[in-house]
Amino acid sequence: MEPQLQLDTDKQPLRELIKAGAYAALSERLPDEHVQDIAEALTDFGPSMVLEVLGMLPVDERPQVFAYLPTAQQYQLLDAADDDFGIPLLRALPADDQTALLESLKPEQLQDILRLLAPAEVRKAMEQLGYPEQSAGRLMNTEFVTLRPNWSLARALDHVRRQGYQGDGVNTLYVTDHRGRLQGTISLKRLVLEAPDQSVQSLISGPLVSIDASESRNEAARAIQHYDITALPVVDKNGVLLGAVTVDDVMDVVQEEATEDFHKIGAVGALGLSLRDARPSLLYRKRVGWLVLLVFVNLLSGAGIAFYEATIEQVIALVFFLPLIIASGGNAGSQSATLMVRALATGDVAPRDWLRLWGREFGVAIALGLTMGAAIYGVGLWRGGGEVALVVSLSMVLVVAFGSMIGMVLPMMLNRFEFDPATASAPLITSIADVCGILIYFSIATAILTLPA
Amino acid sequence: MEPQLQLDTDKQPLRELIKAGAYAALSERLPDEHVQDIAEALTDFGPSMVLEVLGMLPVDERPQVFAYLPTAQQYQLLDAADDDFGIPLLRALPADDQTALLESLKPEQLQDILRLLAPAEVRKAMEQLGYPEQSAGRLMNTEFVTLRPNWSLARALDHVRRQGYQGDGVNTLYVTDHRGRLQGTISLKRLVLEAPDQSVQSLISGPLVSIDASESRNEAARAIQHYDITALPVVDKNGVLLGAVTVDDVMDVVQEEATEDFHKIGAVGALGLSLRDARPSLLYRKRVGWLVLLVFVNLLSGAGIAFYEATIEQVIALVFFLPLIIASGGNAGSQSATLMVRALATGDVAPRDWLRLWGREFGVAIALGLTMGAAIYGVGLWRGGGEVALVVSLSMVLVVAFGSMIGMVLPMMLNRFEFDPATASAPLITSIADVCGILIYFSIATAILTLPA
């Protein structure tokens, strides 16, 4: 673990206090704690204990702590709490968190929770559930303040003040026409700083950035990063403003996407939840498919060996180098696949760069192969004499170069045909490199070695 | 590539227009383009072309486009431009971008650039260069507005208006005492919305969140994510406010850290720059170390095989399954290492979860091993008869279980002793699993098979 922030040092004690049920000490400590730290300390505790602690907080802090609890725990709480206590918690959740909670529930649980909401709130929640999973529509928050283009800034500011303006951390105001279609955005900062007699219209600058609610949340993340904005308006097909995706929502998306790619490159299916909370059966399912699939690729390696069985029987020293040769090809391939998959995921390389990258990889791969071939030549001499050393070194050069090229080209091709490049996982590349390595190694051996008839 | 945002569809033509030197068409198009898109289109073009295009933009947009260009291109431009043109560009850069530019320069280039700045600006830039690399101090922006706790909100708002208040996207104001020590923060939103006769002090709520300038930027990123804030104040040892790290800076950090871990798990050293821009020699250096190191681990595999050479000579069918057995252990190990390394990096698992995770992994690993062993039993029967099938299946169970455990335990141990868990790269785990796999396989073979004397 990296060193904790100084301000975090009290976290463990808070957890301990809760565990010990030291309510007097807790009630003294809680006012000095951040809502996020309280929520973190409450994770894993049962609903009765959590309700107890929530009850010790001021009424306006309870929903905040509640919002930072894991979704599963939120449901347990609402299920266990009196309606008087639970309804304000649920209602105060931002729209995207509400949606996340609702979509995690089984149908009968959903009924339980929906009855806590007013009809208009239910409609809104169900609407948001109608957007595709992983879409911008699911991620957006639906609380925002709209202004009209012909208003003066003074009137706009007055409007903002009257609206009370929830949207925590969001400092963007949306300009819409009479049909609710987005015309542009202005920041609260400019609204405050600019001369109050100007029109809202005059402050809208540059072309409009927005995203359709059905676009992927990934695209929303990219747009926010690319345009360096704190809030991205989400619109429907007609350009009507539906909500906004904010930079803090997007940061979680960036983390989750990185985790997913990370797992994929290790040949693990997307878990969709924390490793901590994954059940053994889920972990088994997400791993077994790839492992069994790779058995068949590896059987090809066996077939390759069977084909050269006569050579092996004659020069048993060749088996000594077999794991080394095939592992080196796999390792070099894992390296280049890793580089390529990540570069494709972050948009770091564009298709127009590919030919150049391919050429560069070829050069690097040959250099790596030569280094590896030289490194192993001496061992070859020692174990098997001059001929074997030549076979081993030459094989090493080719296997490393070949593995590297596969590692780079396979993700590119997958990307080209609109598959996920991360499907070219390190274990897949390794297994393919194994097969190629065996064929290269024994072909060279058969060609070079003077075999007894 | 995923589908481009709708608003991006014109990007390619913009690049083409620049390439073709179609200035008339460009000057028509540029006003409708986002500064970020213009900067992206200008990437890779020489300084004279970029200066030409910048010259076509309104004076106030030039520094914005300049700020989004890659650091290397920024230097080229400043070097090529007249001082009259270059100085405003450099001065308008946010402090963290200025620092990034300066730290990328060679000493003689640094002199070139520093002479464009006023003495006070030079002092500020050099100060920021004094913080450790990858620290919060390097990442922070130093433009902020401070308020005094005893001011009324009316006076504070007036102060904000008079300061003009640069800090793009930052909507947080900092409350400091007479020595500049941070007392708290308030949002511009609350300043605008609350009754103007209240004191600034009365709006500061909850405990203070801040970070020391020498702390790592990683910690800053975690604090911003954990506390769900848009700006994190950066202070010195005495609590004096130095600047702020904002959520958009942190998003880049999160991306870069994920990339670094991604590369490490693939046994590639941190590149420190885009794959696109990496030179072959850099790529070679970042990869060759691990590859050569792993040769030595793989030589142990060879030694293992040499030890069992007699067994192999007698039952050559065993070699057929060798690549499969060792690859399966490596694949299972890569999977569990990937899961563990990422979970440690995101803080998803805490040390108190380890024992439970270890137990769960054991169960999952055995289940995976049994599945794999069953999958391969038939092939064993076909290739080598009942005894060989038993050896192969039993080895598979143990090798997969063993590989999984190594993949989980090694990152945990590295973390425990404060090494980077991502050092347990997939190729390293694979290579270690290879050695273990060979020993397990041939031990079982020697024990079970009826070998001719």
Image: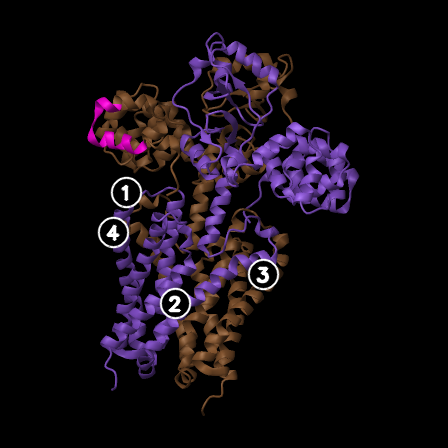
Chain colours: A brown, B purple
Q: Which three-letter amino acid code belongs to the residue tagged 4?
A: Gly
What number is the disc on residue B352? 1
Looking at the image, is mark 3 or mark 2 nearer the viewer?
3
- Label 4 vs label 3: CA separation? 42 Å
The magenta region covers A11-26
Q: Which three-letter amino acid code belongs to the residue tagged 2?
A: Phe
What number is the disc on residue A338? none
Is A263 or A106 nearer to us in this picture? A263
What number is the disc on residue B359? 4
- Label 2 vs label 4: CA separation? 29 Å
Identified at 24% across, 29% down, the residue is A17
- Label 3 vs label 2: CA separation? 29 Å
Q: Please, which chain is the residue tagged with disc 4 on? A: B
Q: Quadrant of residue B363?
A: bottom left
Kindly state the secondary structure of the residue where label 4 is placed.
Answer: helix
Residue A215: tell me if it is visible: no
Q: Are marks 3 and 1 on the same chain?
A: no
* Residue A292 place in picture, x, y as percent: 35, 62
In-image side of B431 versus B86 (left or right):
left
Q: Please, which chain is the residue tagged with disc 1 on? A: B
Crowding at dot 4, Cα within 10 Å, few <14 / some 14-19 / many 20+, comes out as few
Kindly state the secondary structure of the residue where label 3 is placed.
Answer: helix
Residue at which label 3 appears: A361
Kindly state the secondary structure of the residue where label 2 is placed.
Answer: helix
Q: Please, which chain is the residue tagged with disc 2 on? A: A
Is B244 or A289 nearer to us in this picture? B244
In-image side of B31 versus A259 (left or right):
right
What number is the disc on residue A296? 2
